[in-house]
Each structure stands twice: as structure tokens, then as C-alpha cells.
């Protein structure tokens, strides 16, 4: 009977376990959002090497649901070699068709101009003989040819002709008076961008054009508010490169959810156009003013931005997949960049960080990665399954052993051994008679009857003697 009950429990457990694992491992998103928002990375990097062209980075990015990769190329460096574009397109993006390409073909990058090295370009605030301007024919034509080549090879979804352009022009912005002090170079650059925009819209109708602004310290929003209207007619989308939010002195700002939403709201409200976050992150190294806990929370804050502006935001890119190995950025780029080495969602050795789990949770809350199994939940589910099966197996085996012991005992009882039979016979021979209990009355009656019998015998002998005497 017990064995039958155990079998029933075993079968019932097999039916319950799938529901248990679904609850632990694959919770279903309650209210999906941001269906049309693309989410990905800026410069997908690789594991333990920091090279931007390592396949493991793309494997992990695709696993994390990446739909876009945004890269920025300085025009001067790209003009020297086109190999990096071919590698990006043919070696990686061609193997991951779900990841769209966004490229900033930067004539301006941050606070510097990126005109090809063989063109003697100098910033200018007034025109003089020999001044090379942003919208000179030689520059426009060369950039048009470069744009055509890039689009034909890469087939990007988005393209930009500058990155963080307000960083370059802020030199001509007066924060005290809130005025632009010189617009000559700004207007020439805008003219260049308008010509390139028209070229793309005519020849590559599926490609959308970005104008990207830097928004890092709070004061950036002041000059963005002045510069952004100039670019209304030369882009489809306004991009914002937030990177690490800082205070006005350059120190890392640990903003709460309301602070993050306020910053992105201030940018989104500057125009009716859609906007894209081309580069956003914070670091986890406490030695550089970061925190793994804050990085986790910041990931969640960014998804809150998506939820709030899902109808207006085009895409969002986190900086890197993996951390950079210690010393890499300072050795190959700039010592000041070393503080940004821990921007990844995984360590340079591939260990999962708290921010990684936050990313996966938020992606699943959006209704994505429905088949993804979070490692720690998978482990819990696996341990639960092992524990249940282990218990049932143990109970089943122990019940079987107990059943076997009882069965053998019954068989032994039915067919006793020869030794047991012999022992039983000996005990039978030595068996004492059953003890009979007598009352005192019983003993008294017995004594009395024996006394009467003895008297009768004495009388009989007496009578015999009397007869013999009479005969004489």
C-alpha cells in the first residue's frame, strides 16, 4: 500500500515540477511596453581583450536582446582606412541580422573637428583669404562620396555627420548671457549637414539621419537649447549622448529616478521630433566614484525613460557589454579614460554583474527575452528539481528496502529453517504442564475426602479382625 502511494506522489510531482520551474525561471511580463523601441549597445566589445571586434561580444549582445549597435567614426581616421567598416559589416553584422547599424560619420566629434588630415582646416570666426569652411565644395563632395560608400557597404538604419556637436560650438556660447557669440562656423556646418541630409533622403530613403548632442553636466541643456533649433531641417531624429551624468564640475552624479527622468525630459521637450539615446552608462568601480548598486539602479532608470517616452524614443544604447581590462583604456587611449573601464554589464572576465541581471529583468518586463532563463533562477529551479527527485528517489528506495525486508520476513515465517524446527521440537519436549490454580476450598475438600477414605480402610480392617475372632 505504501509503495502504491509513493508511486502516486512521484507521478504527481512530475506533473507539478514544470509549473514550478515556469514560476521560478520564466515569469511572464504583465504589461509589455516599448515594442517599437530598439535597444542595444554603443561599440559592442569583446571578452578579456577589449577589442571592439570580438565575436563573443556579439554573441552575448544578441543573447541580451540587442537590436542595434551605434558606432562613432572620426572622418579623418576613417578616411585613411575603410577596413573597419568592412569588418563591422561583413564579419559581424552579417552574422547577426537582428542587430541594426547606426553610424556617426563624424565631421565633428565632441570638442574637435575631424576634417581629413590632408585638408588644412582651422576654426574660424571670420572669413579671410584661404579660409577653408565647413561647407566648401571640396569638403561637401568628399563627404558625399564617403557617405555613399559607407551606406553601400554597411546599409545602416541611422547615420549622423557629427557627434556631440554642441561640445564643439560651446566655445561660442556665453552661459551668463545665454547667447551664441559667433554663428559663422555654426551656420556653415549646418549648411553642410543640410546638403548631406538631402542627399540621403533622395538616394537612401530607408536611412534616418541623426543630429547628436552631448548632455553630460546639467549646464549642457542650456547650450543645447540654443544650438538645437539650427538643426531642425537637417535630421529626422535628435540624438543625445548622455554617457555618465555629472555635475557641472565633472564629478559623477548619483541621480535618483526622478533626477534621471528630469534630465531626459528636459531634452525630449526641446523638439517634437523623436529622440535617441546613442550612448548612456555609468560605472561600477567605487574607486572612480561609481557603484555596482547604482549601476544596477541606473539601468532600471533608463528603462523607466523608455516606458515614459515609448512613443517618442527611437532607440537606446548602453555603452559596452564587457568591462575593459585594467589599464587598457589608459594605455591605448587616454589615462583620463581609465575611470570608464567598468561601464560594462559584465566584467572583463565574463562574470555577471548586478547591472546585467537588472538589464535582463527589465527586458523581460518589456515583453522581450521570454525564453531567456536567468542564471540564478535557473539554479534555484534546478536545485528544486534535484531536491524533489532526490527525495522521491530516496523515499522510493527506502520504501523498497523496507518492503523487501518485510517480504523476506513473511517468507521466513512460512518456511522455517531446519535449525528453527529443531529448536522448536526441543522446546516442546521441555514444555511444563499447564499450571492449575486451586482455591482453598478445593484443597480442603481434597483433604477431607482422603481422610474419609483412610477411615474407611481402617474400619474395613477392623471389621475383618472382628470376624476372624468370632470364628475362633
Image (spheres, grey):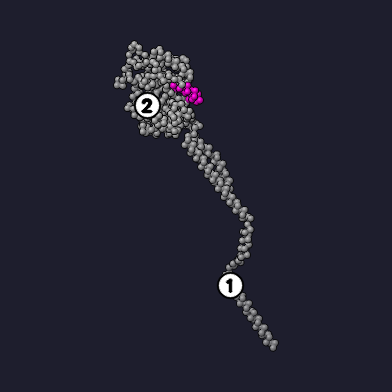
Tell which circle, 1 or 2, labels the residue nearer the N-terminal end.
2
Above/below status of 184 relative to 290: above
Question: Which residues make up the magenta segment?
Answer: 84-103
Above/below status of 432 relative to 201: below
Disc 1 on helix, strand or loop?
Answer: helix
Q: Position of residue 12 (x, y in %)?
A: 55, 41
Circle 1 packing at 10 Å, graded few (<14), some (14-19), many (20+), is: few
Please indicate, yes or no, whether residue 244 appears anywhere in the rendered image: no
Give how far apart the Cα atoms at labels 1 and 2 are. 124 Å
Disc 2 on helix, strand or loop?
Answer: loop
Asked if residue 253 lies left or right of residue 62, the reply is left
Residue at horizontal 57 percent and vertical 49 percent from the top: 401
Please indicate, yes or no, whether residue 74 appears anywhere in the rendered image: yes
Residue at horizontal 34 percent and vertical 20 percent from the top: 170
Q: Position of residue 437 (x, y in %)?
A: 58, 68
Above/below status of 306 relative to 430: above
Q: Position of residue 179 (x, y in %)?
A: 32, 18
Amino acid at each position: 500500500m505504501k509503495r502504491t502511494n509513493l508511486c502516486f506522489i512521484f507521478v504527481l510531482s512530475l506533473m507539478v515540477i514544470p509549473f514550478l520551474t515556469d514560476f521560478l525561471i520564466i515569469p511572464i511580463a504583465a504589461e509589455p511596453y516599448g515594442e517599437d523601441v530598439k535597444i542595444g549597445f554603443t561599440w559592442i566589445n569583446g571578452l578579456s581583450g577589449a577589442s571592439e571586434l570580438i565575436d563573443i561580444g556579439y554573441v552575448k549582445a544578441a543573447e541580451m536582446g540587442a537590436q542595434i549597435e551605434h558606432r562613432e567614426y572620426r572622418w579623418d581616421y576613417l578616411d585613411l582606412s575603410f577596413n573597419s567598416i568592412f569588418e563591422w559589416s561583413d564579419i559581424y553584422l552579417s552574422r547577426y541580422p537582428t542587430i541594426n547599424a547606426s553610424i556617426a560619420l563624424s565631421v565633428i566629434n565632441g570638442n574637435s573637428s575631424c576634417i581629413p588630415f590632408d585638408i588644412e582646416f582651422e576654426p574660424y570666426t571670420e572669413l579671410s583669404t584661404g579660409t577653408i569652411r565647413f561647407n566648401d565644395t571640396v569638403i561637401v563632395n568628399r563627404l558625399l562620396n564617403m557617405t555613399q560608400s559607407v551606406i553601400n557597404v554597411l546599409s545602416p538604419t541611422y547615420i549622423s555627420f557629427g557627434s556631440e556637436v554642441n561640445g564643439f560650438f560651446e566655445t561660442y556660447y556665453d552661459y551668463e548671457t545665454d547667447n551664441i557669440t559667433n554663428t559663422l562656423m555654426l551656420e556653415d556646418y549646418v549648411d553642410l549637414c543640410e546638403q548631406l541630409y538631402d542627399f540621403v533622403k533622395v538616394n537612401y530613403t530607408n536611412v534616418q539621419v541623426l543630429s547628436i548632442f552631448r548632455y553630460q553636466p546639467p549646464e549642457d541643456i542650456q547650450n543645447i537649447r540654443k544650438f538645437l533649433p539650427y538643426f531642425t531641417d537637417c535630421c529626422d531624429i535628435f540624438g543625445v549622448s548622455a554617457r555618465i551624468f555629472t555635475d557641472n564640475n565633472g564629478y559623477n552624479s548619483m541621480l535618483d529616478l526622478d533626477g534621471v527622468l528630469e534630465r531626459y525630459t528636459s531634452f525630449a521637450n526641446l523638439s517634437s521630433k523623436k529622440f535617441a539615446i546613442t550612448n548612456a552608462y555609468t560605472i561600477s568601480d567605487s574607486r572612480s566614484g561609481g557603484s555596482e548598486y547604482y549601476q544596477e539602479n541606473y539601468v532600471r532608470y533608463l528603462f523607466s525613460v523608455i516606458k515614459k517616452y515609448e512613443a517618442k524614443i527611437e532607440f537606446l544604447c548602453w555603452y559596452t557589454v564587457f568591462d575593459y581590462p585594467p589599464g587598457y583604456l589608459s594605455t591605448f587611449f587616454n589615462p583620463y579614460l581609465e575611470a570608464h573601464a567598468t561601464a560594462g554589464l559584465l566584467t572583463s572576465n565574463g562574470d555577471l554583474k548586478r547591472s546585467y541581471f537588472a538589464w535582463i529583468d527589465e527586458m523581460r518586463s518589456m515583453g522581450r527575452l521570454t525564453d531567456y532563463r536567468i542564471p540564478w533562477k535557473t539554479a534555484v529551479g534546478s536545485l528544486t528539481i534535484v531536491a524533489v527527485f532526490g527525495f522521491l528517489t530516496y523515499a522510493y528506495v527506502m520504501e523498497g528496502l523496507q518492503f523487501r525486508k518485510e517480504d523476506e520476513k513473511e517468507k521466513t515465517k512460512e518456511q522455517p529453517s531446519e535449525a528453527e524446527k529443531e529448536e522448536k521440537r526441543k522446546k516442546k519436549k521441555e514444555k511444563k504442564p499447564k499450571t492449575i490454580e486451586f482455591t482453598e476450598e478445593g484443597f480442603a475438600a481434597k483433604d477431607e475426602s482422603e481422610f474419609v477414605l483412610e477411615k474407611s480402610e481402617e474400619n474395613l480392617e477392623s471389621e475383618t479382625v472382628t470376624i476372624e475372632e468370632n470364628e475362633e
